[in-house]
């Protein structure tokens, strides 16, 4: 008796596994009980299970893309204090978070002094892309060049380039801190050329375009790279000083005021 009762369950588990529907199997009894309680029909039962399966699949896909992207940290636009970066239009950043620019294969350049939130915004936008199903890769400019040099010495450069080309969004962070070797600059140029109109690049830099020659060395190469990058590009500048520096200055200032306040005659208890 028990065996014949178990059989459909075992078969169901097998079939749902073979169909890769683990949430259907896991949630079937709970959903059935809920549907019975609410007198929901079979159609509703199937709908609820398929929605749960779909949500789980999307969540896992997003997690996988975030892991593959190798962001330096998890950052979101919700944690970003737009009041501290008034030159950066919040509406424009929220629009970019919808990722239509990536679907249109446009580029984005974020410029600003160190500590103004370029990596934060780049990461947050990259995570938005991952949530929308768009594969993303994050590198510092130096890290990308090193990865390519290493791949080249192992005769795996074409494979790396093909891997990068598959991602609709490539983030190149920190262009400008370290000058590149001639080969490094050429490899970076090659990546930018390959992606031109076939994928999006998000570049962050502490340098204005006029100064990019100082890291890419060759004026000719810089011109050609900028020509590709800035054609159909969104260019955002974050003005001001480092966010953390401003914060710690504010904290010190508040502490001084509090200290002064506790010693001032008005603050002292009258006797
Ligand atoms: P950058 O890449 O421009 O040098 P980061 O993005 O690394 O700057 O910012 C440095 C730190 O300050 C990070 O921890 C970042 O999250 C934080 N930060 C910078 N700007 C803001 C901001 N406007 N709101 C909240 N956090 C910020
Ligand atoms: Mg940075």
Image (cartoon, helix red, strand yellow):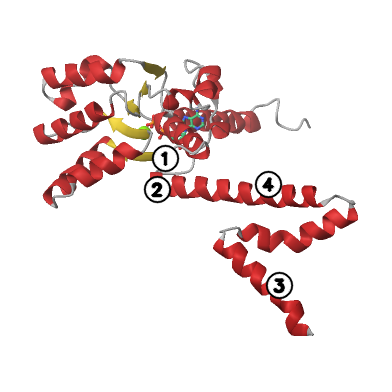
Examine the rendered structure and indicate whether residue 32 appears above or below residue 148: below
In the image: residue 58, left or right of residue 100: right
Q: Which of marks 2 and 3 is in front?
A: 3
What residue would you read off at disc 2?
68
**SS for callout 4:** helix
Q: Residue 219, percent across and down?
A: 12, 18
Quote the CA–CA distance across marks 2 and 4. 26 Å
Mark 1 surroundings: few (<14), some (14-19) or many (≥20) residues within 10 A: many
Ligand 2 rendered quadrant: top left
Q: Which of 170 and 195 is in front in this view?
A: 195
Examine the rendered structure and indicate whether residue 48 appears above or below residue 230: below
What residue would you read off at disc 4?
51
Please give the label number shown on residue 78.
none
**Identity of the residue drawn at 29% across and 43% down:** 163
What residue would you read off at disc 1?
135
Marked residue nearer the N-terminal end (3 or 1): 3
Marked residue nearer the N-terminal end (4 or 3): 3
In the image, the residue with mark 2 has its CB under 8 Å from the nearest atom of ligand 2: no
Q: Nearer the viewer, residue 59 or 241?
A: 59
Quarter of the figure that contains the N terminus? bottom right
**Identity of the residue drawn at 65% across and 71% down:** 11
**SS for callout 1:** loop
| Count of residue discs | 4
Q: Residue 215, percent across and down?
A: 18, 27
Classify residue 2 by image quadrant: bottom right
Quote the CA–CA distance across marks 2 and 3. 39 Å
Q: Nearer the viewer, mark 3 or mark 1?
A: 3
Marked residue nearer the N-terminal end (1 or 4): 4
**Identity of the residue drawn at 48% across and 39% down:** 130
């Amino acid at each position: 008796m028990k065996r014949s009762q178990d059989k459909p369950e075992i078969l169901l588990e097998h079939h749902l596994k073979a169909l890769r529907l683990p949430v259907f199997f896991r949630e079937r009894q709970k959903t059935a009980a809920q549907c019975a309680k609410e007198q929901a029909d079979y159609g509703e039962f199937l709908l609820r299970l398929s929605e749960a399966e779909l949500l789980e699949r999307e969540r896992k896909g997003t997690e996988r893309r975030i892991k593959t992207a190798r962001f330096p940290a998890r950052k979101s636009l919700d944690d970003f204090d737009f009041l501290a970066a008034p030159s950066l239009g919040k509406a424009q950043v929220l629009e970019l978070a919808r990722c239509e620019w990536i679907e249109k294969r446009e580029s984005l350049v974020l410029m600003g002094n160190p500590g103004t939130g370029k990596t934060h915004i780049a990461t947050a936008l990259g995570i938005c892309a991952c949530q929308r199903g768009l594969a993303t890769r994050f590198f510092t400019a130096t890290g990308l060049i090193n990865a390519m040099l290493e791949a080249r010495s192992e005769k795996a450069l074409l494979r790396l380039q093909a891997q990068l080309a598959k991602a609709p969004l490539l983030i190149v962070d920190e262009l400008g801190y370290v000058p590149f070797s001639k080969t490094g600059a050429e490899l970076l140029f090659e990546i930018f050329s390959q992606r031109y109109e076939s994928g999006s690049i998000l570049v962050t830099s502490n340098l204005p375009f006029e100064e990019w020659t100082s890291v890419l060395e060759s004026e000719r190469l810089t011109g050609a790279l900028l020509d590709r990058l800035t054609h159909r590009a969104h260019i955002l500048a974050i003005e001001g000083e480092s966010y953390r520096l401003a914060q710690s200055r504010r904290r010190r200032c508040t502490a001084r005021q509090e200290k002064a306040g506790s010693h001032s005659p008005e603050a002292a208890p009258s006797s």
